[in-house]
Image: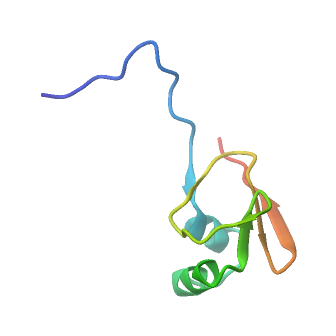
Amino acid sequence: MLSTPSPNLPPEPPTIRLDQFLKLTGLVQSGGEAKFRVQAGEVQVNGAVEQRRGRKLVAGDQVTLNQESHRVELP
C-alpha cells in the first residue's frame, strides 16, 4: 500500500548532498577527494566542521573549504 503525503505538511525543500555540492562548485575534483576532505574535517557548513559527506544541504547553506566559500542556491 502506498502512502500519500499529508495535505497539512509543507513539501520537502530541495536538497543536494555535500559531496555533490563540493564537486559541482569545483571545490574538489572528484568524489574521492570530497570524501577525504570531509572526513579530514577540512569542510565547514554554516561555520561548523562537517564530517558527513552525505549531509543534505538546503538553499542558503554556506560551505567553506580552504577559505573559499560558496552559498547553496537551489530551485
Residue 61 at what x, y percent from top left?
A: 73, 51
- 66 left or right of 29 in image: right
Residue at x-position 18% and y-position 28%: 2
Location of residue 64 (image quadrant): bottom right
Residue at x-position 75% and y-position 46%: 60
- 65 left or right of 11 in image: right
- Asked if residue 46 can be seen in this view, the reply is yes
Location of residue 70 (image quadrant): bottom right
Position of residue 6 relative to residue 61, above or below, is: above
Residue at x-position 67% and y-position 81%: 28
Residue at x-position 63% and y-position 74%: 23
Residue 34 at what x, y percent from top left?
A: 59, 80
Of residues 31 and 47, the one nearer the viewer is 47
Q: Residue furthest left?
A: 1
Position of residue 39 relative to residue 13, above or below, is: below
Looking at the rendered image, the quarter that the C terminus falls into is top right
Residue 14 at what x, y percent from top left?
A: 56, 42
Location of residue 29 (image quadrant): bottom right
- Asked if residue 26 can be seen in this view, the reply is no
Q: Residue furthest right?
A: 67
Total number of numbered discs in the rendering: 0
Q: How is the image coloured?
A: rainbow
Looking at the rendered image, the quarter that the N terminus falls into is top left
Of residues 50 and 18, the one nearer the viewer is 50
Residue 3 at what x, y percent from top left?
A: 24, 26
